[in-house]
Amino acid sequence: MRSGFSSSAFFGRGGERSWLVASACVALLVLAPFVSLGLIAAQGSGDLWPHILAYVLPQALRDTAILLAGVGVVVVTLGVGLAWLVTAYEFPGRRAFDWALLLPLATPTYIVAYAYLDLMHPIGPVQTGLRALLGLTDPRALWFPDVRTMTGCVLLLGFVLYPYVYLSTRAMFLMQAGSLLEAARTLGASRTRVFFRVALPLARPAIAVGASLALMEALNDIGASEFLGVKTLSVSIYATWINRSNLPGAAQIALAMLLVVVALILLERWARRRERYVSQAQRARRAAPLRLKGWRAGLAIALVSAPILVGFLLPAGHVASEAWKRVRFAGVSPQIWQEVLNTILVAGAATLVAATLGFLVAASARLSRAPVGGALLRAASLGYAAPGTVVAIGLMTPLFLLDNLIADGLEAAFGLSVGLLISGSGAALVYAYAVRFLTISAGGVESGLAKLSPSLDHAARALGQTAGGAMRRVHLPLIRPALGGAALLVFVDCMKELPATLLLRPLNFETLATHLYGEAARGTYEDGSVAATFIVLVGLIPVVMLARLSRRRALAWDKGAGDGEAMARDLLLPESAAAVSASAPPAQRGGA
Amino acid sequence: MSAAASLDLQNLRQTFGKTLAVDDVSLRVEPGEIMCLLGHSGCGKTSLLRIVAGLERPDAGRVLIDGRDVVGPDRFTQPEQRGVGMMFQDYALFPHLTILENVTFGLSRLPAAKAGPLAASALARVGLSRYAKDYPHMLSGGEQQRVALARALAPGPGVLLMDEPFSNLDQRMRERIREETVAVLREKGATAVVVTHDPVEAMQIADRIALMRAGRILQIGTAAELYARPGSLFAARFFCDLNEIEALAVGGRIATPLGAFPAPPGLPDGQVTLCLRPFGVTLRAVDSCADSSADSALDPVGVLVQRRFLGDEDLFHVAVEGLAAPLRVRGRAAPALQPGARVSLRVDPNHVLVFGRNSV
């Protein structure tokens, strides 16, 4: 009777071990750039280190700290305020604004900076228009705030990155707080008191998640800060490597930057320390919103329109109209098509790699059930927190060594001269993207798998499948939508990625993002706007997905239907802002 | 603080999109009364409760608390100004506040020196003083329910609204907590409106029950009235598991395979549904009826097809010629009665209900 399968085969020790080994290899690949970063930095940058310590680091740290603090204040104020406005009140167009507030997610920070530099230029449309309005002719007669300042940079980044806070906080207001807000009302609390005493404290974990994501983006940003003259750590790393060709120096700054990342993560964990107490509400119900009329409705509309206008419509509209002019004037240059092709090639390859590896680590974490699997999954997801410049600097040395090894080997064995196989082919870029965005695919697969009952595994195994067979024939088909959604997000993020691309691309290899960077750095805006328009259009895809998803959920709430707790968990970990799921593993585990 | 208030609902209507959730509902609840809104899910009972609390705004109708308009054609008092307490189905305890802070939450208009002791005594009344400094997630479901009750009652609301207050408790605790809750309400003399889908619960706690269906109130009365004189087949089914027999009423008499029954006065001739309560029928083995009196010989006869032991009583299925489904009968019968036996059935006319076609 037992001859069919022994108990050890049933529990699949052997099969699982090979999954774990593969998973460990992936984790090693992800960790490699960080280890090498430490090694390079330890070599010392010679006589440059005193210079860096005295002149570069203090300013970079100070600018980064001011930038992060400023952006933090702006994104939390905007994100929380807007989320409260669209959930607690009803006004004409609220449903449309509800998702339109996500639009700034579609525009990478460097494109917004690029657009505003052009828009606000003394001879750009805004100032020209104002002068025409005032009847002035001399460009110097009108004082106008300069965008190229720390304040300008904080505001721009804030208006582009607030959707992270908006998204997570709005979900919290809608889901968790529904009946709690109503309970507070029936206990005699006014709307203001409800906001400060109930809604805000409850939303704190969500705010922390959203704000930390926004700050990671701000830290990662290279284009906007550089164009606007803010010397952040990211910019300093880039400058140290490109201008001074000093890799150890860049690595040392990169290590300082990693410390900032760790500080951010700790801050986020601290703010969420009581989260598990909070995720208790059982029933999803949106608290009855207050219908605004007259001037109050007008004010609400003005308040929610402003960030959409500033963070999306103005920059995207400007870029699109410039692109249109350019195309009408000169057509689309063949160079652009080559860049589109380049971008799709590297982003596509990286998506394939990230999706495969992400499935591998998430699946092996599920199969093994041992803590090791989960730990490997977490390790493989570490890259999300590392800014692109840090990953790129960390990858340079090992890839260079590997390249030389391969080249020498092939030369010696076959007399072939292949040059730098990895760095020269764009494989380095694919590697860097995979390290950065593996967390999105792994997180997508993980949350997809979490929804499948363990009985499915047991049933498949009892029917004679191996662990791998069950994954392939049962789990993979079931999580295909989750995996597909995650892959799409990886693709879009790869397309938009700038800092690592700048550092690791092969010579004379331009993607849309690097092309735009080049144009902006030179102060020329010609084909740049066409490239920017492409990126924004692609960036819109996940925003539309997200909007449809949240709309479907909003409808479910309006009917008061559905499994509240599961919806709450989904919303806290939206597949779309998958980075959220990457930064929130404890919540996911605790909630189960 | 404030004494029990009366509650008047007049011609309330509410629609959600195309569905009519509340359809012309009028209801008066006397001060100190416990009124149950009873109905299946989606019948509009919770919507009605939320209208009273001020969490929904009705399309039409008025709500008066103690004769004071809170909802009217051009009037809408915000929930925090109504003096209405509400207990939510999921209790809605604030997870970031301690138990005592939860109970104190509604007392913010009092100076702290008064609010503290008041909250503490409310907590003491439900026997949870020892948890004052704990957080809601540390308490069991039953304890959370009592905290929610203490919190809702602490500000002394004129009317307390309770939405399925016991549905999240497990079966064994439910009975005890129900009794405790009613005791607290009686002690406070509070006016309460309780939403439930469970007729047994409604009968246990309510002074009066308003039976709802599809947004309307079908019938209002005490538990005994609703049970004994249900106004419709729907109401009858709600309180009892009935045997239903389709029959024809002709000239004041209803002929059925179980014999003829007098039609209730005023019932027009035509198709009717005749309902028998399962314990309104007495079974006897036919063969043992040698001593049968004259009338028992006229009793209809059936065949016992199944017998289930249910503890205090037995459930019998009896096939009767002319009836589509076996008759369900509850009660005690001779131990010898086994499936296959022929039995006579005697129907107690007090447990027969008749409804015309249009009463459904």
Image (tube, coloured by chain):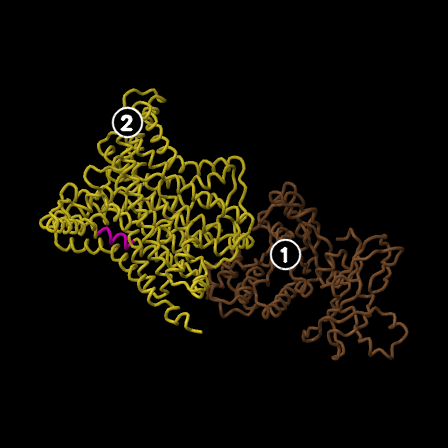
Marks 2 and 1 in Cβ contact (< 8 Å)? no
The residue under the point 86% across, 79% down is B290
Q: Secondary structure at mark 2?
A: loop
In the rendering, at what x and y percent does residue A290 appear? 54, 44
In the rendering, at what x and y percent does residue B172 appear? 59, 70
Label placed on residue B24: none
Question: Relative to residue A53, is residue B297 depicted above or below?
Answer: below
Marks 2, 1: nearer the viewer:
2
Q: Is residue A393 left or right of residue B280?
A: left
The quadrant in which residue B229 appears is bottom right
The residue most toward the left is A47
In the rendering, at what x and y percent does residue A316 appear? 36, 33
State the residue position of label 2: A122
Local packing at callout 2 (Cα closer than 10 Å; few below 14, some 14-19, many 20+) is some
Q: Is residue A280 left or right of residue A493?
A: right
Q: In this view of the protein, can residue A361 be seen by the observer?
A: yes
Q: Which residues are magenta?
A: A256-263
What is the display colour for chain B?
A: brown
Q: Amino acid at mark 1?
A: Val
Chain letter for the part of the structure drawn in yellow = A
State the residue position of label 1: B159
Local packing at callout 1 (Cα closer than 10 Å; few below 14, some 14-19, many 20+) is many
